[in-house]
Image (tube, rainbow, N blue to C red):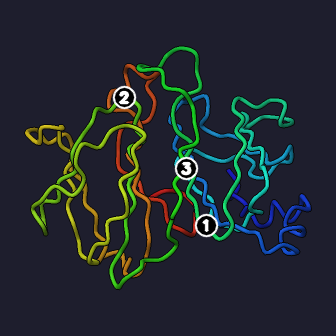
Amino acid sequence: MPPIPTLRKALTALGLFGSLLASAQTARLQVIHNCADLAAASVDVYVNGNLAVPDFAFRSATPFINLPASVDLDVAIAPGNSTSAADAIFNQTINLASGETYIAVASGTVSASGYSPATTFTLEIFSGARETAQGAGTDVLALHGSTDAPTVDVFESAVTSSTIIDDFSYSDFAGYLELPTLDFTLQVRTADNSTIVAAYAAPLQTLGLQGAALTVLASGFLNPAANSNGPAFGLWVALPTGGALI
């Protein structure tokens, strides 16, 4: 699959970026594809009827880019083999505030059957996003984006030995955690904090992520067998520069 083009390049080709440069009304936006439905493994994203991001792959992200603010933007998401915005399986009009920074995450499922629970496809939008850490450490925003995973706690076992996210349910954003740049171990636990569902290394120091702002997503299915054998549950990270999640 070819690399995801930046939205800057795509919108320039559409003539939208030219009008953006002439206006002080701008916002910043990153889009993350976290819809694990196999029917949406690759999608095309249209803005105001124009193809903005072709072949946008599951578990990938655009970089943060400038978009016009204080105007309606019709976002249409279509299958990866679409020919126009008329093929869209989802439409949403967004209006971004001038000077604000956003993260929009494609979540849910699109198929009429084969997924349990069936969860309406949506764009989960977070305002107040960060492109760099506000302090000397690493800032981490978390989204519970796994449609069949229950409410959980996230416990850090290597450094703080404490619950860092409590009662985390599907579609919830946990506000930014401003962490020292160390190597952590994250345990996903049941909501009563009694059972460890899975554990993940979060080697912020080893990966040299001091000063970075990251988005961590619960992604995929806890029970793939009940969800068309789709991708399995895991924690995945979107970098502000975009590209494949890590």
Residue corresponding to mark 2: 148
Q: Residue at x 17, y 54 (%)?
A: 155
User: What crowding class fits label 1: few (fewer than 14 Cα within 10 Å), some (14-19), or many (20 or more)?
Assistant: some
User: What crowding class fits label 2: few (fewer than 14 Cα within 10 Å), some (14-19), or many (20 or more)?
Assistant: many
Query: Taking 160 as reference, is 226 above or below it?
Result: above
Residue corresponding to mark 3: 125
Distance, label 2 to label 3, CA atoms, is: 20 Å
Q: Amino acid at mark 2?
A: Asp
| Residue 72 screen position, x and y as percent | 78, 50
Q: Which mark is residue 100?
A: 1
| Residue 29 screen position, x and y as percent | 63, 61
In this view, which residue lies farthest toward the bottom? 136
Q: In the image, 3: left or right of 152?
A: right
Mark toward the viewer: 2 or 3: 3
Judged from the image, the secondary structure of the residue bearing numbered disc 2 is loop
Q: Earlier in the sequence, mark 3 or mark 1?
A: 1
**Residue 168 position by quadrant:** top left
